[in-house]
């Protein structure tokens, strides 16, 4: 599957254990961040096989997903941050009883595959690694980028590293690390584990670690509400092994 912005692919969700009563087959349009796409990509074919539904995933940062929903774009499931989904529920754009946390993941540090891994085992070691790095990358917008900015501010690194920061607006930090354009990247751990050409150094030190929670819900105007509800249900059932394999915990 070729990845681009937005990504649209027919993929499904792993089903474990329970039989599903097939309903009229239809497309389920999902707007979601990259960490949800990778879960669906790996865990997918069984859901489609069991239900006959086809899942069409469009990948964007959570803030962009929210903007697209607010612009009136049609969708069946949207996944973003808890606060963003709660506002969409309040605005009547997502059905309240379908709102559910899907995944939770910390921020990780990555380097190009095969490159030396800096010591980040303690807070002092992490600070030294940042000061010694030639370039540091994280998202200019998006939840993970804000968490890294907050971590740097907390330990007094903001001004010390500002001249070496690379802050892409698109979700391409891992690709830039793999290409050697960024020496040290910091994104959702699941993205590092599912990206080619990069190695996970480790999570941020506990003192500055934070966790991204992705929350989803079904559109109040969904063209396929039953299929969308079934897909939300299986995020908490059949997809759990894949979620954990990709460095996250189920919501």
Image (tube, helix red, strand yellow):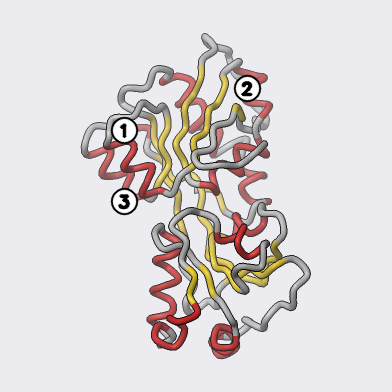
What residue do we see at 60% from left, 15% from top? 52
State how far apart marks 1 and 2 are (Cα): 23 Å
Please, what secondary structure does the residue beneath circle 1 have?
loop
Between disc 3 and disc 2, whose residue precedes?
Answer: 2
| Of the image marks 1 and 2, the number of the one nearer the N terminus | 2
- Tag of residue 83: 3
Q: Which residue is mark 2?
A: 48
Q: Secondary structure at mark 3?
A: helix
- When asked about the image quadrant of residue 11, the answer is top right
Is 232 in front, or is 42? 42
Element under disc 2: helix
The percent position of residue 243, horizontal first and vertical second, equals 61, 47
Tell me residue 180's x, y (percent): 66, 68
Q: Is residue 167 above or below residue 249?
A: below
- Please tell me the numbered disc located at residue 111: none
Q: CA distance from mark 3 to mark 2?
A: 30 Å
């Amino acid at each position: 599957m070729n990845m681009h912005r937005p990504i649209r692919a027919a993929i499904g969700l792993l089903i474990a254990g329970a039989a599903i009563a097939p309903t009229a087959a239809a497309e389920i349009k999902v707007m979601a961040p990259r960490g949800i796409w990778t879960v669906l990509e790996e865990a997918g074919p069984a859901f489609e096989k069991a239900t006959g539904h086809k899942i069409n995933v469009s990948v964007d940062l959570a803030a962009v997903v929210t903007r697209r929903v607010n612009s009136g774009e049609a969708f069946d499931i949207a996944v973003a941050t808890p606060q963003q989904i709660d506002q969409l529920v309040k605005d009547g754009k997502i059905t309240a009883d379908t709102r559910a946390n899907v995944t939770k993941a910390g921020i990780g540090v990555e380097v190009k595959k095969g490159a030396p891994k800096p010591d980040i085992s303690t807070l002092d070691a992490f600070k030294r690694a940042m000061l010694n790095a030639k370039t540091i990358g994280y998202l200019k917008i998006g939840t993970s980028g804000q968490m890294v900015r907050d971590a740097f501010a907390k330990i007094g690194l903001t001004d010390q590293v500002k001249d070496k920061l690379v802050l892409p607006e698109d979700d391409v930090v891992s690709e830039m690390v793999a290409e050697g354009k960024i020496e040290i990247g910091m994104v959702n751990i699941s993205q590092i584990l599912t990206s080619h050409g990069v190695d996970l150094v480790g999570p941020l030190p506990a003192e500055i670690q934070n966790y991204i929670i992705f929350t989803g819900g079904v559109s109040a105007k969904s063209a396929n509400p039953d299929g969308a509800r079934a897909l939300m249900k299986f995020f908490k059932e059949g997809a759990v092994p894949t979620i954990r394999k990709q460095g996250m915990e189920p919501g």
